[in-house]
């Protein structure tokens, strides 16, 4: 069993947004050829930010992730009020501990501020983005928080012709890859 | 000879930026497998905004476009001070006139405000984007100006494996396609 990688997996508009400004996802077509079961099977843990968690909770989507352990990164949520998930304050120690143990990969869910914070701290191994053929012009950006210059390496891509969705997998190029490199 | 289409052709970071905040392009790798001659050969006219024009002028890149006619869309440039190009105030009448005449395609250059203005006025037929494997976090967005919802149709894609650049061609889905549909 290989060591865990931390992989972002998200749908994104061609112009770089992961949700509309009000958290809407209705611009994402449900492509019947995308095998979500197979995608989910690569993970045993989800790491999400507070906004994604609240969106998923409101939409009743949390049950969809079955037996996966859900870690919610938040400085404000009270753990005792969210018994179905594990609230953590700082992703770094948790990610380091999980990476050091065998298991399936860790799903960095949704992008946005959590992705930014994890990228800035060298905690991300891969990005898997379903590029949806739509322009939104505004919304929640994949990567808020200002300028950086993170080089990626394309690992593979696949076209889903019914919706024109391109699923692209990238490795984050880093100076130090640690155990996951 | 077919009627002209208006096609955006630009390089974009994975997170949706076409240049850094100061107009820099040094994040775009020169992929030796991209045949710029073949790309250029599809066009006889370039439509660019003032910022792209001034960038190209400063970098000495205007000569690169050879015999193509260059139209610069600007409300402030004085035509008599820019004899090498044609300064136009409003792209719509020019685009309508060019579309009605036979010829090669019209290259909508660079993206940004000009792309937004042309999309809002239903003047764009296709987007050809070279998605560069890099995250910039900030810069000049492909599409500034706020929310919209423009559906696209993937026409084709090609991988350039040396740099991991994905060249993706999309048609803009519109209610009315006019002569170019």
Image (cartoon, coloured by chain):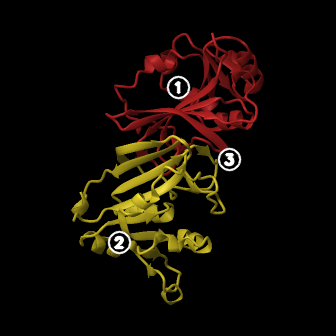
Chain colours: A red, B yellow
A67 to the left or right of B39: right
Chain of residue at mark 1? A
B169 to the left or right of A178: left
The answer to whether any part of residue B150 appears in the image is no
Chain of residue at mark 3? A
Pointers 3 and 2 within a single chain: no
At label 2, counting other C-alpha atoms closer than 10 Å, the crowd grade (few under 14, some 14-19, many 20 or more) is: some
Q: Nearer the viewer, residue B63 or A144?
A: B63
Q: Name the residue located 46 percent from the left edge and 66 percent from the top edge.
A: B114
Q: Position of residue A12 (x, y in %)?
A: 49, 39
Q: Name the mark on residue B92.
A: 2
Q: Which residue has dot 3 on it?
A: A149
Question: Where is residue A35, by image quadrant?
Answer: top left
Q: Name the mark on residue A56.
A: 1
Q: How many marks?
A: 3
Mark whose residue sits in front, 1 or 2? 2
Q: Position of residue B57 (x, y in %)?
A: 57, 74
Could you tell me which secondary element the residue under label 2 belongs to? helix
Q: Name the residue located 64 percent from the left edge and 56 percent from the top edge.
A: B26
Could you tell me which secondary element the residue under label 3 belongs to? loop
At label 1, counting other C-alpha atoms closer than 10 Å, the crowd grade (few under 14, some 14-19, many 20 or more) is: some
Instruction: Work out whether mark 3 precedes mark 1 in sequence or the reverse, and give the earlier one.
Output: 1
Q: Position of residue A168 (x, y in %)?
A: 49, 34
């Amino acid at each position: 069993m290989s060591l865990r990688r931390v992989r972002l997996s998200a749908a994104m508009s061609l112009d770089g947004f992961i949700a509309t400004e009000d958290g809407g996802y209705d611009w994402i077509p449900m492509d019947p050829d995308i095998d979500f079961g197979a995608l989910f099977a690569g993970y045993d843990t989800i790491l999400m930010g507070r906004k994604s968690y609240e969106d998923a909770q409101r939409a009743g989507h949390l049950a969809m992730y079955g037996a996966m352990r859900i870690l919610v990164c938040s400085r404000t949520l009270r753990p005792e009020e969210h018994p179905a998930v594990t609230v953590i304050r700082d992703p770094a120690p948790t990610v380091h501990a999980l990476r050091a143990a065998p298991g399936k990969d860790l799903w960095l869910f949704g992008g946005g501020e959590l992705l930014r914070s994890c990228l800035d701290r060298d905690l991300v191994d891969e990005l898997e983005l379903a590029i949806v053929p739509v322009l939104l012009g505004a919304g929640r950006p994949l990567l808020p928080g200002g300028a950086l210059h993170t080089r990626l390496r394309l690992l593979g891509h696949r076209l889903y012709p019914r919706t024109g969705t391109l699923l692209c997998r990238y490795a984050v190029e880093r100076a130090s890859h640690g155990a996951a490199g």
